Image (cartoon, helix red, strand yellow):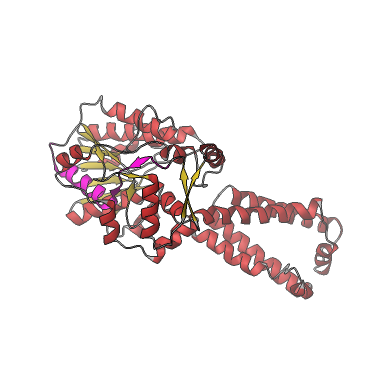
């Protein structure tokens, strides 16, 4: 079968595409960044899509030529713009499904999430619930898959957050009582489920809770993940709900801070279901998380990712503040005459020197604000490195004595370059 997989380079989408291809299906990867998709899936057909913009059926019709089935794996946890969440979780999928009906696509599988219901009042949950309600009104061959916490050799979203929290030094912070329950499902078994649903014509017009066979509390899950990562014992600390809410509020404003209202509420509710209907529908029994983790021992990359998860945004914020303050402090607090000496030595004097001074400080502030806003970090980082090297070379030539400054005014530029390279390397969360 020819299967179109949307969101094919995401955590779930990439495993689904790989599984379907290995079974023998002709997979068409539909992604936002075609160049990245072609690099990751060189043997697959890769076509573009944008769930923020593609909200009309006619946007999807050309992509569905000779397609037998569609698997929608696109999702977003949080956004400042509620219209973006609504487009990604509701408007674009509705347009896609209507186009599938017009093109006689045999089946549509939509990856939703367990625990999406009226009581969870996040834009993430409510937009997904709105789409599910719409699907239940359609006389069409659709299937909704609602996985619990998805884990595997890679990680993204909730799994990455759980690993990072379990890997903190000395303590394991737990939200509230830590008794909230999960039924983790392995990513390979979710991908296997997708394949079964595609090939089984009797599975239609239903929502399937995709869950593992055993139930773990948040506390038990964190302790299990810490042991899997090979880390030493740590003290479990129950963090007051009020403090978590404060962190979630801050995370709502700074989008790449891992804790936000959606993740907070994800940790506040049970995420479980009866596994028997799932087993009966798909015809296999999923493995317990303890068994799968034993079969897939953690690697150094897993430990690096867990340890760097919180350091990544902190590194970006600290670098952004350095640039902002390096532009503000010379203007308002400490105008060093040496700066004008440098301009004078290269023939820039008078009003032109003043304009260069204020222009360079404004540039520093703008680069810092762009970094804080997480805007095109790879391009911004390259420009920052260029400026650091340029400033360093100019000062080294005109004021070489600054290399002997006891506070390391110029020497600090060396680690700053490598810190910026590290920020750029970690700028892509996928």
Query: Does the magenta portion include 44?
Result: no
Instruction: Return the x and y of residue 105 as percentages of the image width and height.
Output: 21, 37
Q: Quadrant of residue 360?
A: bottom right
Q: Quadrant of residue 397?
A: bottom right
Query: Does the magenta portion include 191?
Result: yes
Q: Is residue 95 left or right of residue 330?
A: left
Instruction: Return the x and y of residue 411 as percentages of the image width and height.
Output: 69, 71
Q: Is residue 327 left or right of residue 199?
A: right
Along the line of sight, the residue nearer the viewer: 317 or 392: 317
Instruction: Return the x and y of residue 398 as percentages of the image width and height.
Output: 78, 73
Q: Is residue 352 left or right of residue 10?
A: right
Residue at image position (24%, 26%) is: 138
Q: Is residue 57 visible to us here? A: no
Residue at image position (52%, 47%) is: 257
Count of numbered tags? 0
Along the line of sight, the residue nearer the viewer: 275 or 331: 275
Magenta-colored span: 178-202
């Amino acid at each position: 079968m020819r299967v179109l997989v949307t969101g094919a380079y995401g955590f779930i989408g990439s495993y689904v595409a790989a599984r379907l291809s290995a079974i023998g299906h002709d997979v068409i990867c539909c992604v936002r960044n075609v160049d990245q998709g072609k690099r990751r899936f060189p043997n697959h057909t890769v076509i573009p899509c944008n769930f923020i913009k593609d909200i009309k059926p006619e946007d999807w019709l050309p992509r569905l030529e000779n397609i037998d089935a569609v698997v929608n794996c696109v999702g977003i946890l949080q956004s400042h713009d509620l219209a973006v969440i609504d487009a990604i979780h509701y408007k674009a999928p509705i347009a896609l499904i209507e186009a599938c009906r017009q093109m006689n696509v045999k089946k549509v599988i939509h990856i939703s999430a367990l625990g999406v219901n009226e009581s969870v009042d996040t834009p993430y949950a409510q937009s997904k619930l709105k789409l599910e309600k719409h699907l239940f009104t359609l006389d069409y061959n659709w299937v909704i898959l609602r996985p619990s916490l998805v884990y595997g050799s890679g990680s993204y979203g909730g799994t990455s957050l759980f690993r990072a929290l379990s890997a903190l030094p000395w303590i394991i912070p737990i939200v509230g009582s830590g008794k909230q329950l999960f039924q983790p499902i392995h990513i390979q078994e979710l991908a296997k489920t997708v394949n079964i649903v595609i090939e089984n014509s009797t599975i239609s017009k239903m929502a399937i809770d995709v869950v593992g066979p055993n139930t773990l509390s948040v506390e038990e899950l964190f302790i299990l993940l810490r042991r899997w990562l090979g880390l030493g014992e740590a003290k479990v600390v129950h963090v007051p709900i009020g403090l978590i809410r404060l962190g979630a509020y801050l995370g709502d404003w700074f989008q790449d801070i891992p804790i936000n209202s959606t993740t907070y509420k994800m940790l506040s509710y049970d995420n479980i279901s009866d596994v028997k209907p799932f087993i009966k529908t798909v015809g296999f029994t999923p493995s317990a998380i303890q068994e799968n983790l034993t079969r897939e021992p953690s690697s150094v990359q897993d430990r690096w990712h867990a340890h760097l998860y919180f350091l990544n945004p902190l590194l970006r914020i600290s670098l952004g503040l350095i640039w902002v303050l390096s532009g503000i402090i010379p203007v308002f607090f400490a105008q060093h005459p040496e700066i004008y000496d440098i301009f004078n030595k290269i023939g820039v004097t008078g009003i032109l020197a003043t304009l260069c001074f204020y222009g360079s400080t404004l540039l520093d502030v703008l680069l810092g604000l762009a970094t804080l806003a997480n805007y095109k970090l790879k391009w911004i980082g390259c420009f920052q490195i260029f400026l650091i090297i340029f400033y360093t070379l100019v000062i080294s030539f005109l004021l070489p004595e600054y290399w002997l400054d006891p506070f390391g005014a110029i020497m600090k530029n060396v680690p700053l370059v490598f810190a910026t390279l590290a920020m750029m390397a970690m700028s892509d969360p996928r």
